[in-house]
Image (cartoon, rainbow, N blue to C red):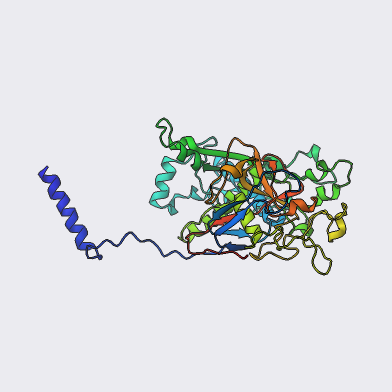
Amino acid sequence: MKKIVVLTAVLAFLYSCGSKDRGELVGVKGKKWHPEKPYGMSLIPGGSFIMGKSDDDIAQTKNAPTKTVTVPSFYMDETEITNSEYREFVYWVRDSIIRTKLAILADEEGKTDPNEDGIAKYAFKDADSTGRTAWEKYTLENYAGLGPTGYEGRRLNRDVDLIWDFSEIPDEFYAEVMDSIYLPEAEAYNGQRTIDWTKIRFQYRWMDIESAAKNTRNTGLKRSDFIKSENLEIYPDTTVWIRDFEYSYNEPMHNDYFWHDAYNDYPVVGVTWKQAKAFCEWRTLKKNIYRRERKRHQINKFRLPSEAEWEYAARGGLEGATYPWGNYYTMNDRGCFLANFKPLRGDYAADQALYTVEADAYEPNDFNLYNMAGNVAEWTASSYDPSSYEYMSTMSPNVNDTLNKRKVIRGGSWKDVEYFLQVNTRDFEYRDSARSYIGFRTVQSYMGTDVVGSGKR
């Protein structure tokens, strides 16, 4: 006991001698935090608003009674996620899969010298032990390979460009890997072999924090019981252009809409709710990799907006408005339509658009958000329950039932009548469904509480 007391006293003495706080309680301080507005997003100042149907419920759905709610500040994409942006996600996953296959084959064949030509240039970056830190050595020895492939935790070499021109493939090992991700020769047509996109799958893990918080008193459950794994195909379902409209010729949209540069700035469609959620996870991962390399704070995750956040943002600070632009009409004073939808008696082309339009078409609302009405309907994070307004919280409300496969979509689309464009109209789709008229945009919670808007009346 005497030794423990002496040791404690020595430690206390050493600490007090090395401290610059003069013994005062100053708190633990880290690096100074500077809020950084994400590229392509607008800051939506938090505040209260009347959520729900403030005018006649023409469809008599009776599922959106008015309710005053408050949402914290958040960033939101100014436009719907475009084909070009979603392709970046698809290509990143595709390239990661190819690099992993190349690295594994290089390891199996003993081709790990980066100075060699061919597949050796794509070997795992940690194959050369000379540059490893003590932590990398420890984790590699104790954790790498604890998974189905035996190569989990290994670092890919992204410094070397992939080779796509078949005439420049360096060796037979590289050719074997490339051949494995393409469709078989028997399924090629017009002289082209395309990638088998069913093999391009994104894997990630996430924690169901809501369920964990609700089960804190269940001592039989561990943290690992709430960690979920996802492994899903991410390529959009381009067949929606044909399946959604029987007895209609939409083959050109099926063939070209997602991948052709002519549609780069158009909203991505054919994406399920799960794929939209995976995109959010990837976007967070991509940004945090960049920040980690520069020893900066990690960011808040990108995610889908809650139903309340979406409606609050769509209103642009205007209380009681029917549409994002603030009145009861879908035309301006010059007789031009203000959004992309199905106007009049089903004249798709009357608003100068037959299908979708560019994601930044038409005028933005007062929060600088484009196409919060029309163009494509948008996934939200909220589960759809006709009576959810009756029991949801008034502070940052969100109904998230993992067993409910119906997810709220908002905003209406290019094929909808004007009722679905109203900021307070609710609709839903099943989370595993993909449609030619549903896209999404992402949000990120604001770090801090000093940005609050009072709204316009």
| Residue 101 in view of the camera | no
Q: Residue 156 vs residue 360: left or right?
A: left
Q: Residue 448 vs residue 365: left or right?
A: left
Q: Residue at coordinates 61% horizontally, 58% vertically from top-left? A: 76
Q: Name the quarter where the N terminus is drawn.
A: top left
Q: Position of residue 329 (x, y in %)?
A: 78, 61
> Which corner quadrant of the image does residue 356 belong to?
bottom right
Q: Residue 436 vs residue 11: left or right?
A: right
> Which corner quadrant of the image does residue 219 belong to?
top left
* Foreground pick, 80 / 405: 405
Q: Going by the picture, which residue comes out furthest to the bottom?
A: 334
Q: Residue 276 vs residue 126: left or right?
A: right
Q: Position of residue 188 (x, y in %)?
A: 81, 41
Q: Going by the picture, which residue comes out furthest to the left?
A: 2
Q: Compared to 127, does 361 lie above or below?
A: below
| Residue 441 in view of the camera | yes
Q: Residue at coordinates 70% horizontally, 40% vertically from top-left? A: 198
* Foreground pick, 433 / 39: 433
Q: Position of residue 298 (x, y in %)?
A: 48, 56
Q: Compared to 129, does 77 lie above or below?
A: below
Q: Residue at coordinates 64% horizontally, 60% vertically from top-left? A: 319
* Foreground pick, 173 / 102: 102
